[in-house]
Amino acid sequence: SVLDYDYSLTNPAATVTETHGSTDIGATLGAGVEVAVTNDISLFGEYRHYWFDDDAAAFAGPAPVPAQSVNPDLDMDTVSGGINWHF
């Protein structure tokens, strides 16, 4: 899996906004099921978990505003479902 992301931190006291971004490579694991409703129609559902390295960034503001740091957890879970029409 590949994740390309950007995030911003705004410090209203210093009226400063800084942006950080990166591209991470991770792993994906999931499972799914498909059930026939008729000969032509089926329903499906899927679950996936994505693992990515956590990121860390420090944002420095002008004095006397202290620097702030963030450490977002970039892992995510997705659930999807739908209907297939077989023709």
Image (spheres, grey):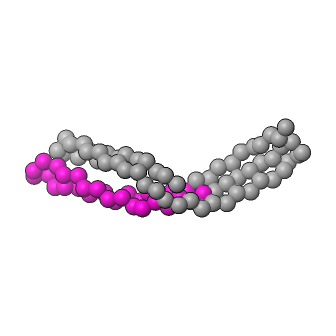
Residue 42, x across and y down, in percent = 81, 47
Total numbered labels: 0
Residue 11, x across and y down, in percent = 23, 46
Residues rendered magenta in the picture: 48-77
Magenta region, main secondary structure: loop
Which image quarter holds the C terminus? top right
Residue 53 falls in image quadrant: bottom left
Q: Is residue 55 left or right of residue 47?
A: left
For image coordinates 49% across by 59% down, the residue present is: 26
Residue 34, x across and y down, in percent = 77, 53
For image coordinates 20% across by 42% down, the residue present is: 16
For image coordinates 14% across by 52% down, the residue present is: 65
From where the camera sits, is residue 35 visible?
yes
Residue 59, x across and y down, in percent = 23, 52
From where the camera sits, is residue 75 visible?
no
Q: Is residue 78 left or right of residue 42?
A: left
Q: Is residue 70 left or right of residue 2?
A: left
Q: Is residue 38 above or below residue 25?
A: above
Nearer to us in this view, 24 or 7 = 24
Q: Is residue 45 above or below residue 17?
A: below
